[in-house]
Image (tube, rainbow, N blue to C red):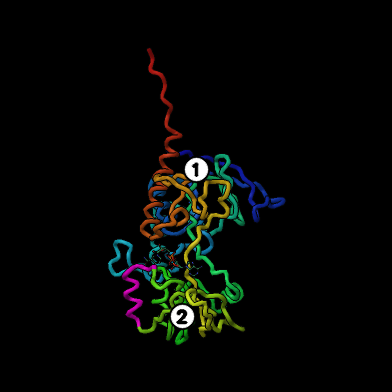
Amino acid sequence: MPMKFQFTITPTVGGETAEGAAEEEVPVYDLVIIGGGAAGLTAAIYAGRARLKTLVLAGPLPGGQPANTDIVENFPGFPEGISGSELTQRFRSQAERFGAQVVLDAVTEVDFSARPFTIRTYGATYRAQAVIIATGAVPRRLGVPGEAEFFGRGVSACATCDGFFYQDKKVVVVGGGDSAIAEGLFLTRFAREVIVVHRRDRLRAAPLHQERAFANPKMHFVWDSVVEEILGEQTVTGVRVRNVKTGETSVIEADGVFVYVGMEPKTEIFAGQVELDEAGYIVTDKHQRTSTPGVFAAGDVQDPDYRQVVIAAGSGAVAAIEAERFLAEETRPTQTQPPV
Ligand code: NAP
């Protein structure tokens, strides 16, 4: 059985010890899971069922990428599809049913140099015998003038959150992958026109998404083009695009710009604690083990290739099974020499 200790820590604020704060007895968790998306919550279901004392630090907005997805159509068991937010809410309820504690707090710092590991949030310090990192990935930014300035004032990376504000408006979607096309299709429910600006002359998105996009009379495509600038005054008024083949630039008038140009793993706080690859993804083996014994990773934070809810969930299950084995191995009695 995994160990369950009591450990004395001082409550912290912003990673610093709160002056004058009384020391508080808090448990050392068997397992702290950092991230509350499909991978983290599935890991929590498995860990809870394995009777590990489990804490999920789910960040301020739990649910990960699926929570920002209108409908998930390819998660098995839901033949009609299920809304991304409902699916993640169900993951959470299931994890809590088996005893996992879910806290909406963002991790700011970790120290994996000694066990129990230390995990700090803005308001607290936690310790754990094992950790699963499931922080996922965040939408990449274009990095062009106007993008940061108009973010939240016409520039968005979440059609599910902001699409409603574009009733009968014209919007630009940047990118040619599944996110751009799925979210562009979602935007056609509100907008009168959705212009997809893609840097090549063919989409990367899956065939089914392509079929739907090409069949939708509200969707139009500007091929071989990149957005060079997002234009606006109080809010967005359009984008300046450049055709990469001809070099010509032109302005597309639009009320909103949705950017879907890929994802970046959320790993800044883990640099130096576990091995990262050149693109910043956590390096794991097939048992979801990182380079630090006792620290596992699951989901998009270690997966540059597939990024599917079902795969994130599967890797979360593997990580939890392996964490439980890791902890059980430690408490197994050592083999003694049989008497002669
Ligand atoms: P993605 O597949 O990496 O596609 C990113 C798109 O943005 C590509 O079309 C890429 O162009 C373009 N792009 C990248 N950098 C750019 C830049 N600087 N300027 C202009 N365009 C740029 O990312 P994603 O669409 O977010 O999808 C991520 C993963 O989630 C994928 O594995 C996808 O299959 C999965 N996903 C699945 C579903 C689903 O319903 N099954 C839904 C959403 C996402 P190029 O094509 O030229 O590289």
* Residue 203 placement: quadrant: bottom left
Q: Name the residue beneath numbered marker 2.
A: 164
Distance of label 1 from label 2 (alpha carbons):
44 Å
Describe the element under mark 1 as helix, strand or loop: loop
> Measuring 53% from the left and 46% from the top, which residue is drawn there?
274
Q: Residue 96, relative to residue 171: is it above or below?
A: above
> Measuring 42% from the left and 21% from the top, which residue is drawn there?
336
Quadrant for ligand 1? bottom left
Query: In the rendered image, which quarter contains the C terminus?
Result: top left
> Measuring 71% from the left and 50% from the top, which residue is drawn there?
20
Q: How many marks?
A: 2
In the rendered image, residue 195, in percent from the top left (x then y), is placed at 44, 80
Describe the element under mark 2 as helix, strand or loop: helix
In the rendered image, residue 149, in percent from the top left (x then y), is placed at 61, 75
Q: Of residues 48 and 263, which is closer to you in this image?
A: 263
Q: Name the residue beneath numbered marker 1.
A: 291
Amino acid carrying label 1: it is Ser
In the rendered image, residue 328, in percent from the top left (x then y), is placed at 42, 37
